[in-house]
Image: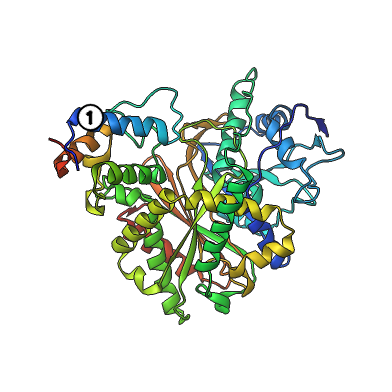
Amino acid sequence: MPAFEPQDVERRLLDFVNSELGLALGRPITAQDFLDAVGVDSLAFLKVLLFVESVFGFWMPDEDLVDENIASVEALTRYVCKRGACA
Amino acid sequence: MGREVSGSRRLPLRGADLVLVGLASRYGGGINNAILVAETDGPVDTARAREALSRLVDEVPWPAARLGRPFPWGRLRWSAGSRRSLTVPPLQEVVLPADKSIESVVENEMSARIDPWRGSPTRFTVVREKHGRSAFVMAWSRPLMDPRGAENVLKRLARLDEDPGYRFPAWAAPKETMSLEEWGRVGRRARDHMKTIVASPVSPGRAVAVPGRARFLRRLFGEGPSAGSRVGRDVSFRLAVTAKVVAELFRRRGLPEAPFLIPLSVDLRRRGEEDPLFGNCLAFHFARFEAHETADSMHLAGALRRNLAYAFRDGMIEANRVGMEFLRYRPIRSLLREMVWARGGDAFSFNCADTGVFAAGLHSIFGAKLTGGYHVPEVLPRPGLGIFFSRFGDHPSVAVGWVEGVLDDGEAHGLAASIGEEMGWVPES
């Protein structure tokens, strides 16, 4: 699995969230937006988990599904890097 | 009081509608009433509500498009006269005596069958308790609308009331991107999948098939210390927790340990949109697991989550949507042949639903401030048990619906309390 720069992780996650989740916020989602608040419900979040698995190579375990790790794209980026995806 | 509606568009029906219609037919005209309750700080202005309902049938294309369509339902009877002429749905005002509560009105609404072939598919009630609470209750025939669709109707009624000049934006159903051949391939795959997962009977079978009056209770909770965990907000976890509590109940009842089969509905609307889709926009994922797997909720939730995620990845959700759409093109008789699980008289093990935040963005209706809101679970013919999770602000709630005889009051209270406890919520009065 290639090592990513943190900015690259964030960009990929943002691209995915903005293009694939069918959100209708009227503006692009930013890294700081709370995913719950912009309409990412538990089913939409499953798609994020699948994306993380396919691009960064791991399935997020249940115990890591806490706000600290997944509240926003910024938090998710930190978590993905912590899991060893970043250079 | 007929009204001519122009410019109506035909919106898609979902095959899931027909599954429910098929079930109703199978059980000799079962009740498919679905209900939402909007709690307010005072009685809503009935005249304003009536005017908004009137404008709804006048100005919103959905009711005419949906109800004017004869296939495959046959002619529905919201129309007073011609197909394009709709009557305003009934709205009643109820002031309760001191010994009656809003819940008693809800139970009446559950049991008084809405028959869209003979009357309005929706009805509304303004309820006021003698000393205290008020509510606006909406009941509808389930196949016409899913709960989120009903919330959208509520929000649109509020919009019509608040903004007399508001014009609804034009909307058309998205174009189908698959070829007919692709549809056929995917639809057959879903049908085969359904036959696989329902090859054997699902719990609890005939042992609890007791036709009777629909009952209901709701318990309100506050967030507990685990509020920061995504797991607790996840539909898979809620289903696992509910399955655990229901499995314990079935075990206490001495019912045979059959596999569980639960339909998980997937809302196909775009997230976060103030959506014009009032109707039924659900696809289904079918969760199947053994009774002994319910002992460890976290483990079962993880397995269900992964299973659901892979169903998305592998196109199974889409396939099931298409599979359900296929059913709609068949006569009801052949529909029942496809619904292999219903042949033995069982539908699903129980009904479990969750819409997240109740009518997000809605703060008042017809001059009254919204103070709470929840959905009442449908009570499918068999086994006659439903659980619905709702949330208003920081307050999650659990509503249990059952057919009299399936549970007693103590068991229903115990069910709601155990679910709240497993969720880590704090009971509120």
Where A74 falls versus B306 (above or below)?
above
Residue B425 falls left or right of residue B184: left
Snapshot quadrant of residue A8? top left
Where is residue A62 shown, x and y percent of the image?
26, 53
Q: Between residues B139 and B172, which one lies in front from this camera angle? A: B172
- Check the image and report above or below for B392 versus B274: below
Residue at x 63% of width, y 45% of height? B180
Which chain does tag 1 point to?
A
Residue A65 in the figure: left or right of residue B106: left
Q: Amino acid at mark 1?
A: Asp
Q: Secondary structure at mark 1?
A: helix
Residue at mark 1:
A8
Kindly give the residue lying farthest to the top in the view shown.
Answer: B165
Residue B341's x, y, as percent? 58, 69
Q: Residue at x 66, y 41 (%)?
A: B12
Residue appearing at x 33%, y 63% in the figure: B300
Which residue is at the far front?
Answer: B181
Looking at this view, is B176 or B416 the one in front?
Answer: B176
Q: Looking at the rendering, in which quadrant would you find the N terminus of chain B?
A: top right
Q: Residues within 10 Å of mark 1 (few under 14, many from 20)?
A: few
Residue extending farthest right? B81
Q: Determine if residue B30 is in view.
A: no
Residue B348 visible to the viewer: yes
Where is residue B250 shown, x and y percent of the image?
Answer: 45, 75
A12 or B208, which is in the foreground? A12
For the point 58% across and 57% down, the residue is: B188
Q: What colouring does the structure picture have?
A: rainbow
Q: Nearer the viewer, residue A34 or B310?
A: B310
